[in-house]
Amino acid sequence: MSTTVLFDAPGPKARARHRITAVVGGLVLAAILAFALYKLGEKGNLAADKWTPFLTGSMWVDYLIPGLINTLKAAAISIVLAGIFGVIFGMGRLSHTRAIRWVATIVVEFFRSVPVLVMMIAAFSFFSFNNIFQSEINPLAAVITGLTLYNGSVVAELLRAGVGSLPKGQSEAGLSIGLTPLQTLRSIELPQAITAMLPALVGQLVVVLKDTALGQIITYPELLNNYQRIGSNWSNIVPAMLVIAAIFIAINYALTTLAGRVESRLRSKGRATIGRGGAGPGAVGLVDAGAVDEARHHADEESLRGH
């Protein structure tokens, strides 16, 4: 019988139990879905006149597409800024200088602990009272600020965990060819950590996209905020929420699928040497030869420039 690291392959009885559990779970899920549809129909939310507005061009041009554009704009800017924030403070948390490491740790832990909505409201109040931006830009700036600070702190922690999960031989290989600890971190460890933690990083990107919906509290006209306008015009709030939820699901699924392909491509090129449940810091593992060669090349160039 073939075995895995964690458990033995299931036998005939276990497979039978798994099939029964799957069937029962499917029936329960179908019953819940049927009950939800019954309740929607009972309230008239399945009537044709509630859904036909979504087949008109004015619905998409005037409501859904502008809201989607605002959602994607806030998410895109926040993702870029959160990535920059995460790399800077993630490297700060890995610094060998105690003062830098402490400052980075305090910043990361503070913004990870504060709810995103609280940071959005605080930023919106600060921008509004101090006239830092024009009034129509304040909601967007507040949404970006909250998303950047929170998700950037999470990204920083993910990168720190990714570097910590690499085999110890990675850093030793960089130091053995004359690189400084900072050069080893930047050229060898960080690229591998990003690849190894890609599933978690993608999950955080999905969180950024979903959390843009919190912007409706501070009057940012994102996609979810438009369901109230749609409902007031066509009296179909529930169908509007379901359509908007379907749009969010489609975008998040596309983002996750794209990231999965990128991850597979990076791993096929040998960019990472640890799996999703990577080895501990002291584990023995293969050294990424490509990363070491690239790091050696950069070190040679810096040495020549120094002369």
Image (tube, rainbow, N blue to C red):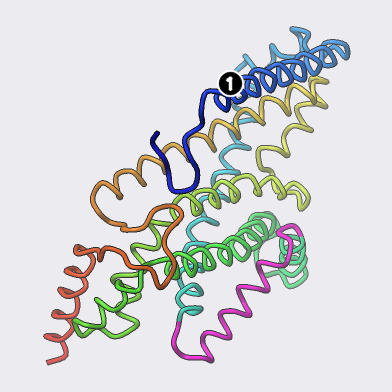
Query: Hey, which quadrant is residue 137 in on the image?
Result: bottom right
Which residue in the protein does label 1 denote? 16
Q: Position of residue 282 (x, y in %)?
A: 40, 73
Q: Is-magenta flag for residue 115?
A: yes
Of residue 45 and residue 287, the one placed in the foreground of this image is 287
- Name the residue at 66% across, 19% down: 26
Say what secondary structure mark 1 lies in: helix
Q: Position of residue 22 (x, y in %)?
A: 62, 22
Find the residue positioned furthest to the top.
Answer: 48
Whether residue 101 is situated above or below residue 284 in the rendered picture: below
Q: Position of residue 139 (x, y in %)?
A: 69, 55
- Name the residue at 59% across, 79% down: 105
User: In which quadrant is the C terminus drawn?
Assistant: bottom left
Whether residue 25 is situated above or below residue 135 in the rendered picture: above
Whether residue 111 is situated above or below residue 176 in the rendered picture: above
- Name the residue at 26% across, 63% down: 286
- Describe residue 48's horizontal placement relative to residue 133 as left or right: right
Q: Position of residue 299 (x, y in %)?
A: 19, 80
Please state which amino acid type lies under the numbered disc 1: Ala
- The span shown in magenta is 95-117
Q: Is-magenta flag for residue 245?
A: no
Report the predominant secondary structure element of the magenta stretch: helix
- Name the residue at 60% across, 49% down: 207
Query: Hey, which quadrant is residue 228 in on the image?
Result: top right
Of residue 103 and residue 75, the one placed in the foreground of this image is 103
- Describe residue 114's horizontal placement relative to residue 2 as left or right: right
- Describe residue 95's horizontal placement relative to residue 230 as left or right: left
